[in-house]
């Protein structure tokens, strides 16, 4: 995980008076001519009077962009910046390379040279596209809050204007360096960009869909076997068709490789989930790379060198140290109707031998119906009934049709859904990382089984990476008692729950994750994908 911490002090001092009010102004096209003081430089006069001086630019430049342009020109001495052909050509070259970042270069097209055009307006238009390209490359073209909101325990303090203006200042001397600085440095982004740059220039492969049907296990005969073989050949998983209708060893091996690279249970058994992934078109697969580059631009703003990173789509957790992933484990995440939220927080404490107070949604939708059907359910599940203050109540005294304001709590023990340990972090969703007795579910894929919390396959190994040796020894002692304890970490650990559906693995291959929350097509449409 990488997060830049640059001061940009000189730029901050220069542009702060101009950009400080950008967020307070309405983000609308300029429509009213603003009187310009007579002592302003010509470019600043033009910016102050855009509707009358450069009316064609008004739809492109809102109030915030206008302030950023004013700061940019002031930073550079208030003179025209794009009169030199060499600088324009260097910018044009970098804009074309944005295609490898999944951005459309036509969104940043420079005005064509025109001897009859207003020179200042053409210069301002070039600067606007330059600054916009740097911002979109660094922060993303779309607003994450509109599509996949990320809750923060501590609001971000970065100022996008300051960073973009710093990149822009560098670019006037070295355009390639400026765009490379703006581009996220995280390996998740750089490796996927390299993959997309290769894939987008290749002809799309072709494959026909595989028909739905009954579960297909190794060794069975099935009329779909030839079309399955053709599909795997088209995807590069199989060299040649084995012939016949038997689902034999060679084809099983290819199916397992496909399942492994698509975050499925790699058992060679072909069910509805594997067929669904097989039938995603080559065009959609290519577009997945493009939209996940946008997700990684969002993600880059919250990555830190140390901490826990969760990919909800893949149900996978990684621990980072000094910006390098040092450990991974499998997870179980929220199912589609009870999605795991995206958030950034800090793990502050561990609950050892936890009890489980059932959340309101689970009690209303799951537990109360079960209790009404089976009077023995409370005893079987070791559930205690409590009033709102936590005092025990007799179950037989409760009207389970209208139970009122009660709590259900399960004591610590081997059947407790939270297992032996919970990693807690502040958030408004009451979700956390925790152990689980449902260990067999970790072999499945996709692993969307929970009601929103994140179940960890190897929670004690994760604990080891979060604490000091002394804290590990102490928590081991407390776990051995079987009694519930709250243990506060000496050093809180960042945790980031995010969502992406493809990445490049250590071997350089693409690994897809099922789009369990059906978000990809929404992003494709918003990014203007052409399928």
Image: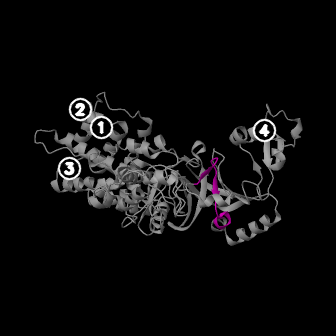
On residue 2, which mark appears?
A: none
* Disc 4 to disc 3, C-alpha distance: 76 Å
Residue under label 4, please give it: 373
In this view, the residue farthest toward the top is 32
Element class at badge 2: helix
Name the foreground residue: 39 vs 114: 114
Q: Which residue is drawn at 39% across and 62% down?
A: 190
**Labels 4, 3: front one:** 4
Residue under label 2, please give it: 55
Q: Quadrant of residue 408?
A: top right
Q: Classify residue 60 as left or right of residue 23.
A: left
Residue under label 1, please give it: 60
* Disc 2 to disc 1, C-alpha distance: 10 Å
Element class at badge 1: helix
Element class at badge 3: loop
Q: Is residue 290 visible?
A: yes
**Labels 3, 1: front one:** 1
Provide the residue span drawn in magenta: 447-462
């Amino acid at each position: 995980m990488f997060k830049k911490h640059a001061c940009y002090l000189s730029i901050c001092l220069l542009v702060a008076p101009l950009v400080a009010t950008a967020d307070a102004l309405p983000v609308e096209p300029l429509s009213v001519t603003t009187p310009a003081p007579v002592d302003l430089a010509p470019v600043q006069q033009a910016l102050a009077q855009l509707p009358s001086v450069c009316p064609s630019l008004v739809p492109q430049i809102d109030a915030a962009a206008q302030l950023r342009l004013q700061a940019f020109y002031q930073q550079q001495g208030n003179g025209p910046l794009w009169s030199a052909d060499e600088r324009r050509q260097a910018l044009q070259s970098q804009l074309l390379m944005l295609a490898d970042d999944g951005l459309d270069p036509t969104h940043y097209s420079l005005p064509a040279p025109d001897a009859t055009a207003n020179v200042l307006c053409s210069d301002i238009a070039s600067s606007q596209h330059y600054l916009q390209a740097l911002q979109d490359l660094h922060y993303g073209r779309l607003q994450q809050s509109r599509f996949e909101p990320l809750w923060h325990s501590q609001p971000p303090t970065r100022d996008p204007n300051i960073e973009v203006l710093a990149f822009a200042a560098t670019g006037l001397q070295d355009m390639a360096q400026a765009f490379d600085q703006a581009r996220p440095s995280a390996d998740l982004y750089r490796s996927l960009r390299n993959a997309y740059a290769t894939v987008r220039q290749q002809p799309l492969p072709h494959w026909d869909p595989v028909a739905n049907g009954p579960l297909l296990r190794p060794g069975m005969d099935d009329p779909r076997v030839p079309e399955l073989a053709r599909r795997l050949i088209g995807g590069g998983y199989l060299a040649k068709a084995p012939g016949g209708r038997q689902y034999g060893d060679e084809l099983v091996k290819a199916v397992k490789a496909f399942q492994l690279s698509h975050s499925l249970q790699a058992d060679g058994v072909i069910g509805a989930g594997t067929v669904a992934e097989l039938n995603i078109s080559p065009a959609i697969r290519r577009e997945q790379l493009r939209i996940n580059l946008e997700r990684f631009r969002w993600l880059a703003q919250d990555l830190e060198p140390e901490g826990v990173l969760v990919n909800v789509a893949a149900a996978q957790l990684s621990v980072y140290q000094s910006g390098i992933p040092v450990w991974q484990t499998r997870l179980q995440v929220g199912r589609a109707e009870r999605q795991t939220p995206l958030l950034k927080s800090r793990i502050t404490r561990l609950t050892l031998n936890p009890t489980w107070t059932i959340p309101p949604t689970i009690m209303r939708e799951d537990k109360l119906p079960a209790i009404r059907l089976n009077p023995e359910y409370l005893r079987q599940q070791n559930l205690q009934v409590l009033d709102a203050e936590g005092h025990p109540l007799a179950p037989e005294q409760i009207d389970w049709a209208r139970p009122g304001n009660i709590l259900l709590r399960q004591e610590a023990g081997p059947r407790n859904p939270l297992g032996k340990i919970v990693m807690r972090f502040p958030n408004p969703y009451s979700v956390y990382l925790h152990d689980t007795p449902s260990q067999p579910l970790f072999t499945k894929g996709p692993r969307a089984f929970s009601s929103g919390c994140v179940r960890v396959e190897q929670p004690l190994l994760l604990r080891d990476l979060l604490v000091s040796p002394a804290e590990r020894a102490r928590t081991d002692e407390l776990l051995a008692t079987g009694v519930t304890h709250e243990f506060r970490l000496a050093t809180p650990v960042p945790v980031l729950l995010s969502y992406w559906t493809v990445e490049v693995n250590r071997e350089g291959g693409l690994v897809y994750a099922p789009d369990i929350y059906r978000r990809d097509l929404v992003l494709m449409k918003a990014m203007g994908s052409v399928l």
